[in-house]
Image (cartoon, rainbow, N blue to C red):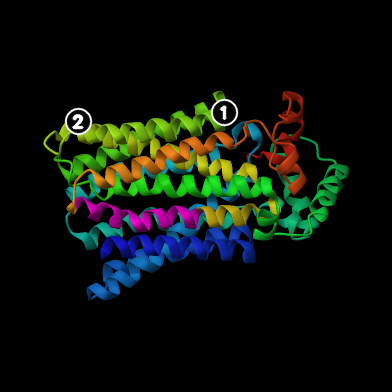
């Protein structure tokens, strides 16, 4: 019950984050969930009974998911093409480090209330500096708040020691005005975007089924639960570092296809070892989880780069909901092991392999600017920016701010 409640919380948090992002913008949609996360992390330690603890954990989960998803979008929209993958991968990298550290914290501090207060300490630090984050200039332009966007872009240009021309802002505003439709309507009416959307949706769903099926069996691999959790966190750390490098070296498409196919094959290899070989099963499970996490990071990058500004938040929000739905059914898939231990492995490895095959239909987006309109998204997928073009846009699309 606790596991299903946690995943249902994740599903609801993605929906809440999606609504906040459309109504309040990127900045507020990052700040509000983080404050909620801090408050309900603290109240979880003070709950007098289990039902109130579950409610507090549910609300804390909503805050966590809203912050994480919106922070990635805000970072992505301020980063240029050459470093755009960092917006997602660095977030995942610190998440992996947090998992490894959490294993050590819980190993030495068995008082769960004290552990809650300790985990709330870094959240309090974040709640202080988060109010100084800038709003997304892309979102401001999409909402017609041109003057506010201009002030931010001028500040970015000054920090990066670049010049900013008003004529360039006028061109951006004209492109934004051409896109009259917004949200899911654009995705549904465009056959190209619809194809990209459903492929990514299925891939995101599949990798989360695999990820959580393995994660929820952390105590069933035959090794110490704390050691297994530590290994999970430590293996995800190099995964994100490699992801940042390979996304720029090999591109999104090859990286995505290879992680899905290799991860699925490693999961299939678990069938060759019975539960009596804990070291081999743990090694394969850790490797499969490593690649599933890697593929999820690429999904986050892909969904930002394939869809235009007017529906980027919709695609990202619905994609995240699909991923959490995958986590929601993972415990049910694991329950099929009561009939035979191999059934869950066959299901989540099969889903991952199918996703890898479908991903051959996705285009390469490395070095391409974020599309501002449906025409950009549909027609410019094969047109890469030259080095000169990338450098000319750095002062607008990328920032040290």
Vertical placement of residue 17 versus 278, above or below: below
Vertical placement of residue 373 versus 328, above or below: above
Whole-percent x, y for residue 272 in the image? 21, 31
Q: Determine the residue positioned at 80% across, 56% down.
A: 146
Predominant secondary structure, magenta span: helix
Judge left or right: residue 97 versus residue 307: left
Q: Which residues are magenta?
A: 320-337
Across the whole image, how many numbered discs are drawn on residues? Answer: 2
Q: Which residue is mark 1?
A: 251
Residue furthest to the left: 276
Judge left or right: residue 70 versus residue 52: right
Q: Which mark is residue 225?
A: none
Whole-percent x, y for residue 360 in the image? 55, 33
Q: Nearer the viewer, residue 375 or 346?
A: 346
Question: How many other residues sit within 10 Å of disc 1, few (<14), some (14-19) or many (≥20)?
Answer: some
Residue furthest to the right: 167
Vertical placement of residue 185 versus 300, above or below: below
Q: Dividing the image into 4 quarters, which one contains the N terminus?
A: bottom left
Q: Nearer the viewer, residue 342 or 364?
A: 342
Q: Residue 332 colored magenta?
A: yes
Judge left or right: residue 131 versus residue 40: right
Question: How many other residues sit within 10 Å of disc 2, few (<14), some (14-19) or many (≥20)?
Answer: some
Q: Nearer the viewer, residue 195 or 309?
A: 195
Q: Which residue is mark 2?
A: 280
Whole-percent x, y for residue 294 in the image? 43, 37
Measured in 3D between alpha carbons, the distance from the residue under mark 2 to the one under mark 1, in whole angstroms, is: 31 Å
Q: Residue 212 colored magenta?
A: no
Dot 1: element = loop
- Can see residue 131? yes
Q: Determine the residue positioned at 26% across, 64% down.
A: 2
Q: Determine the residue positioned at 57% across, 65% down.
A: 20
Whole-percent x, y for residue 251 in the image? 57, 28
């Amino acid at each position: 019950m606790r596991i299903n409640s946690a995943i249902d919380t994740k599903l609801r948090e993605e929906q809440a984050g999606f609504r906040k992002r459309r109504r309040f913008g990127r900045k507020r949609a990052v700040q509000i969930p983080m404050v909620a996360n801090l408050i309900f992390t603290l109240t979880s330690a003070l709950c007098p009974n289990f039902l109130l603890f579950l409610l507090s954990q549910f609300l804390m989960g909503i805050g966590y998911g809203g912050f994480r998803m919106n922070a990635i979008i805000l970072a992505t929209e301020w980063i240029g093409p050459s470093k755009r993958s960092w917006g997602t991968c660095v977030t995942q990298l610190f998440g992996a480090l947090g998992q490894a550290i959490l294993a050590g914290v819980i190993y030495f501090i068995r008082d769960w209330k004290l552990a809650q207060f300790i985990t709330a300490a870094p959240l309090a630090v974040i709640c202080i500096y988060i109010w100084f984050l800038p709003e997304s200039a892309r979102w401001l332009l999409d909402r017609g708040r041109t003057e506010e966007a201009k002030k931010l872009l001028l500040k970015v240009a000054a920090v990066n020691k670049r010049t900013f021309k008003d004529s360039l802002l006028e061109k951006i505003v004209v492109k934004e005005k051409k896109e009259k439709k917004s949200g899911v309507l654009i995705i549904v009416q465009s056959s190209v975007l619809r194809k990209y959307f459903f492929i990514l949706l299925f891939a995101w769903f599949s990798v989360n089924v695999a990820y959580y099926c393995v994660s929820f069996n952390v105590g069933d691999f035959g090794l110490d639960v704390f050691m297994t959790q530590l290994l999970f966190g430590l293996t995800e750390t190099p995964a994100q570092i490699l992801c940042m490098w390979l996304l720029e070296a090999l591109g999104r498409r090859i990286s995505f296809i290879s992680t899905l196919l290799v991860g699925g094959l490693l999961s299939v290899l678990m069938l060759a070892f019975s539960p009596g070989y804990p070291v081999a099963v743990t090694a394969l499970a850790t490797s499969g989880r490593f690649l599933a996490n890697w593929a999820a990071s690429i999904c986050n990058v892909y969904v930002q780069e394939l869809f235009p500004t007017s529906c980027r938040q919709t695609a990202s929000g619905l994609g995240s909901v699909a991923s959490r739905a995958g986590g929601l059914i993972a415990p049910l898939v694991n329950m099929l092991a009561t009939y035979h231990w191999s059934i869950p492995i066959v299901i989540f490895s099969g889903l991952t392999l199918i996703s890898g095959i479908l991903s051959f239909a996705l285009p390469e987006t490395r070095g391409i600017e974020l599309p501002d309109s449906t025409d950009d998204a549909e027609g410019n997928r094969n047109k890469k920016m030259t080095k000169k073009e990338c450098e000319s846009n750095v002062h607008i699309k990328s920032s040290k701010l």
